[in-house]
């Protein structure tokens, strides 16, 4: 609940307001006021999409200042960051959950912790492998650029872990890295 106020001859009166009703269109009994919190989140998500998929001066500036040699998934907000960057970081997790990466060169996609091979993270599909993997933050490029693939484990794979490993190898065998930047869908 929020208050609307009114001033009648030196006397203040407060009226309670139910925002879900106020947000409704006038035809449905509301005032047609836009929910600015939702509008802001939508706009921030659009900026993240453009940051990942387009080239321009502002994208280059943001990438050089905040992302550097990391992936978007790996960066976080820090004290002293701009309000714009703090806003982007505030919606980043939801944004990444709602889409997936399309692989080109694989340099901006974390192998285990980003959505790029289907709709589920590889760490969720193969939790037993993820638990014993040495470099959990490796990118797709770091893993797939060498033969055999560049994944090492803290212990030998036996039983179900070995079966999961063979299944994972089968799924990624047809992935070919290409020139160009990864994109987000």
Image (spheres, rainbow, N blue to C red):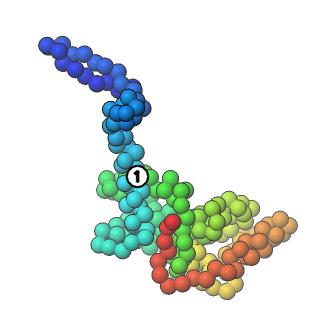
* Up-down relation of residue 81 to residue 108 (above or below): above
Residue shown at 70%/61% (left/top)? 125
Residue shown at 43%/68% (left/top)? 52
The quadrant of the image that shows the N terminus is: top left
For residue 124, what is the image quadrant?
Answer: bottom right
The mark tally for this picture is 1
Label 1 secondary element: helix
Observer able to see residue 143: yes
Residue shown at 53%/79% (left/top)? 104
Observer able to see residue 77: no
The reply, left or right, for residue 184 in relation to residue 111 is left
Tell me residue 3's x, y (percent): 31, 24
Tell me residue 142's x, y (percent): 58, 78
For residue 158, what is the image quadrant?
Answer: bottom right
Is residue 100 or residue 137 the one in the foreground?
Answer: 100
Tell me residue 88's x, y (percent): 39, 56
Identify the residue under disc 1: 42
For residue 112, what is the image quadrant?
Answer: bottom right
Is residue 138 or residue 108 the one in the foreground?
Answer: 108
Residue shown at 36%/74% (left/top)? 55
Q: Residue furthest left?
A: 9
The reply, left or right, for residue 104 in relation to residue 28 is right
Tell me residue 139's x, y (percent): 56, 73
* Up-down relation of residue 9 to residue 143 (above or below): above
Q: Residue furthest right?
A: 159
Q: Residues within 10 Å of mark 1 (few under 14, many from 20)?
A: some
């Amino acid at each position: 609940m929020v208050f609307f106020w009114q001033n009648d001859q030196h006397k203040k009166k407060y009226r309670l307001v139910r925002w879900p009703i106020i947000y409704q269109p006038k035809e449905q009994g509301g005032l047609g006021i836009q929910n600015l919190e939702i509008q802001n989140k939508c706009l921030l998500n659009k900026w993240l999409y453009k940051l990942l998929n387009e080239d321009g001066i502002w994208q280059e500036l943001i990438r050089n200042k905040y992302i550097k040699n990391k992936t978007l998934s790996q960066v976080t907000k820090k004290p002293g960051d701009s309000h714009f960057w703090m806003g982007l970081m505030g919606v980043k997790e939801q944004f990444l959950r709602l889409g997936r990466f399309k692989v080109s060169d694989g340099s901006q996609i974390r192998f285990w912790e980003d959505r790029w091979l289907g709709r589920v993270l590889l760490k969720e599909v193969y939790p037993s492998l993820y638990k014993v993997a040495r470099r959990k933050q490796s990118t797709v490029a770091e893993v797939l650029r060498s033969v055999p693939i560049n994944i090492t484990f803290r212990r030998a794979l036996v039983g179900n872990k070995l079966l999961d490993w063979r299944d994972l190898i089968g799924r990624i065998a047809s992935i070919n890295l290409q020139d160009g930047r990864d994109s987000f869908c």
